[in-house]
Amino acid sequence: MLQRFAFRLNLALEPWFPEQRLFLKSDTATRFVRLRPVTQAMGLMIGVLATGWMMVASALLIVDMLGQANSRDQVASQTEVFAERLEALSADRDLRVTEAAGAQARFNLALQQVSAMQERLLASETRLRELETGIDVIQNTLRRTIGERDAARAEVAALAGTVQGPALQAEDLAQTVDLMTEALTAAARDRDGMAGEVAKAEAKTAEVAKAKAEVEARNAIIFAKLEEALTVSVEPLEKMFEAAGLNPDDLISAVRSGYSGQGGPLVPIKLSTMGLSGSPDETRANAILASMDTLNTYRMAAFKVPLGLPVKTSFRMTSGFGGRNDPINGRHKMHEGQDLAGDYGDPIYATADGTVTYAGWESGYGRLIKIKHAFGIETRYGHLSEIGVSVGQKVSRGEKIGDMGNSGRSTGTHLHYEVRLSGTAVNPMTFIRAARDVF
């Protein structure tokens, strides 16, 4: 049955694949190999399939290389945007602080002018009350003097008994009226002068009050812009640290407790002039300063947390964090890092500021570097070909620390990158994606 089917199949393929014979001649005999139509068709199909597989594999490899190149460009671009945005926010913060300080200085000057005018106004009112009191005293003295004079004249008239009494009384009365008129005129003149000064003081007070209102309006606009800018800047940083599994409050406390002198916490404003401490402007200014201090603290923390990539050249991500089958013995085990495959000798960079705690050979890791960072974070760089740092050396973000290799328990050139929190390994991609998703 099979022979019949083979015969018919060969007969059907004969027009396209005629039977061929390959003669093999030696010194003693001549042999030939018969290539039937079915054999030739199968060989052609195998060749076509092999060619198609090679084309598909090449296309997939090219697409993968292009995708990795685009990913690296995006990471580099996002890192540059992050740095530029931090610099812009810092410059804007300094500008806003300068404007707030200038507005506060103008406000304090206006308060001083208002205080001086109020003091002059109070002095004018005090002098006016003194003049009124003096006029009352003069009037009382005049009335008493007139009474005493009248009594004396009555006694003189009774003793003298002359008819000149009424004339003398009229003359004395005229002199008394003249004295009172002069005294009242002088008092009125002083009172008018004081009233003019009071009017001037009131006008000046109105001008100062208007200037104060304008300053308060400008302060309100500045405060609103600062509050908006800080809200837009601080919230993404908080989300970034939370996405990386870090508590923002703990980060702020740790940075402030270990502060080494760069920048400095912003000191709250305290106004003691005229008892204005606790005013709404002071409260808003202190809130803005607190937010600026938080932003500055987050900026410092960002350089101490490993948010970047340790490789800047061409690479592709192979084994990720989590359970996997061991590539050497095939057993299922935990993979505590992220593998980044690249070329032998590619430079490896520190992902955050820190101190080197280990630089040498370790079983399984091969040539290994451990860097201790702030907040209980540690990064590890394994399977290196060269180590460029030593124990105790302080490194900065982006500083070269070694070269990619294939040392230790490894099947090919790559970097084994780990991130540990308080000694426990966590997924490094959590930190990388946290910064990428925000910036």
Image (tube, rainbow, N blue to C red):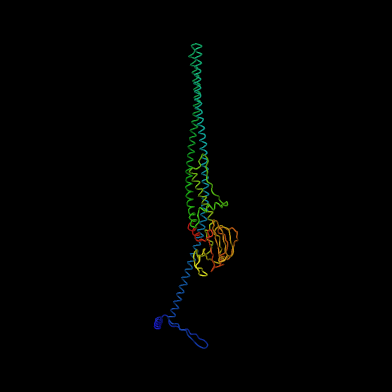
Q: Which residue lies furthest to the bottom in this view?
A: 28
Q: Where is residue 398 in the image (x, y as percent from the top left)?
A: 55, 59
Which quadrant of the view contains residue 360? bottom right
Relative vertical location of residue 90 with respect to residue 6 in this rendering, above or below: above
Taking depth in this image into account, of 415 and 360 the one nearest to the observer is 360
Taking depth in this image into account, of 130 and 383 the one nearest to the observer is 383
Relative vertical location of residue 122 with respect to residue 362 in this rendering, above or below: above
Taking depth in this image into account, of 153 and 206 the one nearest to the observer is 153
Q: Position of residue 376 (x, y in %)?
A: 54, 57
Q: In which quarter of the image is the N terminus?
A: bottom left
Q: Where is residue 334 in the image (x, y as percent from the top left)?
A: 51, 65
Task: Indicate left or right for 6 with 171 as reference.
Answer: left
How many numbered marks appear?
Answer: 0
Q: Position of residue 347 (x, y in %)?
A: 56, 63
Taking depth in this image into account, of 130 and 258 the one nearest to the observer is 258
